[in-house]
Amino acid sequence: MQGLYFNDGKAVLRQDLPIPEPQAHESLIRISLAAICNTDREIMKGYKPDFSGVLGHEFVGIVEKSNDPRLIGKRVVGEINEGCGECIYCKTGREKHCESRKCIGIARKDGCFAPYMAIATRSLSVVPDNVPDEHAVFAEPLAAALEIPDSVHIRPSEEICVIGDGRLSYLIAQVLALTGAEITVLGKHEEKLHRFESFAKTTTACDRRFEMVVDAAGSPTGIENAMRLVRSRGTIILKSTYAGKTETNLSAVVVNEVKIVGSRCGPFEPALRLLSRGVFELPPIELHPLRDWDKALASHAFKVGFDFR
């Protein structure tokens, strides 16, 4: 089979990849749609220099083989982390922090930019019938957005700034708006910011401060802006992953008693329930055949992916 394969710092479209044979605890998924995440682009810039394998971690597909026969033929999405099941993290509900974890398309596990992928069966969630593929493929980033209220208490009276005007920011702002909090989105692109206007205030420049600031800019400037915008004793939520490093004035963190919280993957079942209820505004996804992978990765569309159907 073909697949978008990353190795030695570059991606190539290979035609000689075997269809994966699922292990005893895994299912074989025939991919329907796979979406491009900013993390995929950052891997190609050097974010995960040791990774070698098929890229991609946002998908919806059909189960063709499984150790759970009830799943065969079902339409599914899947969480991206697989822990060892034996370490202190796995045994205390923190599998996504297992030191030997596999992460599809990111670390030690082939991803979904290929027609087939094998994944741990326990990672799968069945997609409700009323959720189309084009919406189900948002389950992974929506789950990441839901991780914020799942880990940090948000008061309806809160004033929150979301830094970034991309796809993850779009979902984060909608999730946080559901709490009743006042949301301001700080971005760089007027043509993107207009999408946020039904559930948030938008701006390209901001000189006020907020109780909570979410960095979803996907660049080193995000934490710099967050430090500038957060109030003393406020909270910064970090959602950005990117190649390269940034400098932060830790003395200011101490003096201003700022709480900094890292936030990554989140819960899939709540994401699917909300998608089923039609709660969110979702942008159309620009779909490409895998052979046009370079065109897809270069696209400036708000959401881009591959169609394997």
Image: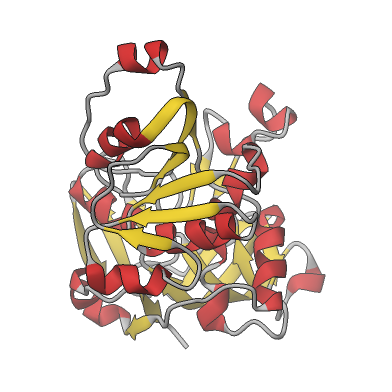
> Where is residue 175 shown, x and y percent of the image?
58, 59
The quarter of the picture where residue 71 lies is bottom right
Q: Position of residue 237 (x, y in %)?
A: 47, 37
Q: How many marks?
A: 0
Q: Give coordinates of residue 228: x percent, y percent.
A: 29, 32
Q: Nearer the viewer, residue 271 or 180?
A: 180
Q: Residue at x 59, y 85 (%)?
A: 132
Let me know if residue 122 appears in the view.
Answer: yes
Using residue 153 as the reference point, say whether residue 262 is left or right of it. left
Q: Quick check: 228 above or below 282?
A: above
Between residues 188 and 110, which one lies in front from this camera angle?
Answer: 188
Residue 161 location in percent, x, y? 42, 47
- Residue 270, above or below 100: below
For the residue pair 246 and 180, the one nearer the viewer reads as 180
Q: Is residue 24 visible?
A: no
Above or below, 269 relative to 62: above
Q: Extreme bottom residue here?
A: 309
Residue sitting at 42 percent across and 58 percent down? 168
* Quarter of the picture holding the N terminus: bottom left
